[in-house]
Amino acid sequence: MSESDLAVELEGIEKRFPGVIANRDVSLKVRRGTIHAIVGENGAGKSTLMKTLYGMHQPDAGTIAVNGQLMTFKSPSDAIAAGIGMVHQHFMLADNLTVLENVILGSEPTSGGRIDFGNAHALVREAAQRAGSLVDLDAQVSELGVGERQRIEIIKVLYRGAKILILDEPTAVLVPQEVAELFVNLRELVKGGATVIFISHKLDEVLAVADDITVIRAGTTVGTVKPAEVNKKQLGEMMVGSELPVPPARVTKIGDKVLLNVDDVTVAGIEAKPLVESVSLRVRAGEIVGIAGVEGNGQFELCEAIMGLRPVAEGKVELDGKDLTTLSAQESRGSGIGYVPFDRQREGLMLGAPLWENALLGREIEPQFRKGPFLAAAAVRADTRRIISTFGVRTPSETVPAYALSGGNQQKLIVGRELESHPTILIAAHPTRGVDVGAQATIWEELRKARDAGMGILLISADLDELLGLSDTLVVMFDGRITARLAPTDATPDMLGVYMTGTEQEVA
């Protein structure tokens, strides 16, 4: 492979942070006009490497070459000027602005000292056509679905002239039909001369869309393979350096006792239309009830209402026969509800606090952590170390601040914390979002163990394989209502995708 064939070449990249070597002698060669996937465990160094390529970090050693030219990027603006764009896992859009305003923000075309909206429309429309997206440029972003927001993020980087696109977990919140559409658009971009670097934990998708796959383990490059050369199991074992655990046979022992009863619950919206409308569901002892739905269809508001974070306008919520409808979030937790929140950073962690403090959140009154009126610090730290060990949280110690962990490791800490509190009911929102295949297997196994021990679990996930594999009962939410109830054994990802987009509905 000659240098003229390469869009990106990283050689000997090293990046150190206090107490951690995130990248060590990493090499990466990305052929021009291809889709190149990067896979690896949480904390393996994927995001650090891409942030280095994008100018968010400066390497401590090694070189970066773009289209055969050695480059030094001191900021993302330098990378953008070199034709590199990055779409982050968490969308960076302003809900109160239009599509057009979001795309041009910070790079507005001007004429006579004012924004030239006519030229802006033309330029953004051209970028949208390159992305294969027909979007209403005047639509408010707050009114758009997740798939449309994903397309806008891609249009943003194309508008800024990107020829090399870095996509970080781009399918994490998409339904199968949206994933298929995204892949068609990516292939069209590549045909038009673009190069795509695709970070994902979904190995089936990586094998389906990538031309080349680079595996990173423990901060260094393991190797680069062609999809035709490996299967999903082999790729997963390259990532973790050992054989993947085999999931146990599904054995479900659902009890008769109803632990969570959501009865005809309505959550009011700002305007006349409610955010959640007349939703009823039950979770029994030893049962996992899965909620499928495209984000923004009421799942978030329903969970907040159950937790006491949002008022219930009509209906009631009962836990083990106790009315929780008017209780606060703290009172709901004290009654026996655990919660893995939708947004780990905003709702689940104190990013500046050490891991042991984060492992204590919501559990401060548990007897094992008290020594009279004082905190039993040794017990808290021991419990945190147990969570770190059980869930494979990559960290030097429990004293590291939460912001120092990768997103997947932050997620593992939260799931471990909530399961360690042994709640009666666990609300688990996207419990494995952003975690690697090995950690995903661990979390699934721990959720199964909790279920088999009698816990009731309400599972909200965008991963349809996760919903089908874990759930004992499945419901679909669309437009704030339950529109279908399905047995997991009778459903398929494509069938769920149809219900989730509102194309077909059952009487709930």
Image (spheres, rainbow, N blue to C red):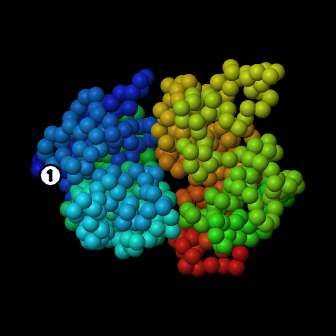
Q: Is residue 60 above or below residue 304?
A: above
Frontmost residue, 27 versus 56: 56
Tally of numbered discs: 1
Q: Position of residue 466 (x, y in %)?
A: 58, 57
Q: Say which of 246 and 471 sits in front.
A: 471
Question: Residue at left 53%, top 70%?
Answer: 497
Q: How far across and how far down the image is residue 385, in percent? A: 61, 27
Q: Quadrant of residue 112?
A: bottom left
Q: Tell me: 444 left or right of 19.
A: right
Which quarter of the rendered picture does the C terminus lie within? bottom right
Dot 1: few (<14), some (14–19), or many (≥20) neighbours within 10 Å?
A: some
Residue 209 at least partly seen:
no
Q: Is residue 185 left or right of residue 401?
A: left
Taking the spot 38% from the left edge, 32% from the top edge, the residue there is 22
Residue 403: tell me if it is visible. Answer: yes
Q: Amino acid at mark 1?
A: Asp
Q: Position of residue 249 (x, y in %)?
A: 64, 53
Q: Is residue 120 left or right of residue 381?
A: left
Q: Secondary structure at mark 1?
A: helix
Which residue does the numbered mark 1 point to in the structure image?
A: 5
Residue 304 in the image, given as x and y percentages of width and height: 68, 55
- Kindly identify the residue that appears in the image at 25 percent across and 28 percent down: 61
Residue at 61% in and 71% down = 478
Q: Is residue 368 above or below residue 255?
A: above
The single residue placed furthest to the right in the displayed view is 321
The answer to which quarter of the image holds residue 178 is bottom left
Residue closest to the far front: 112
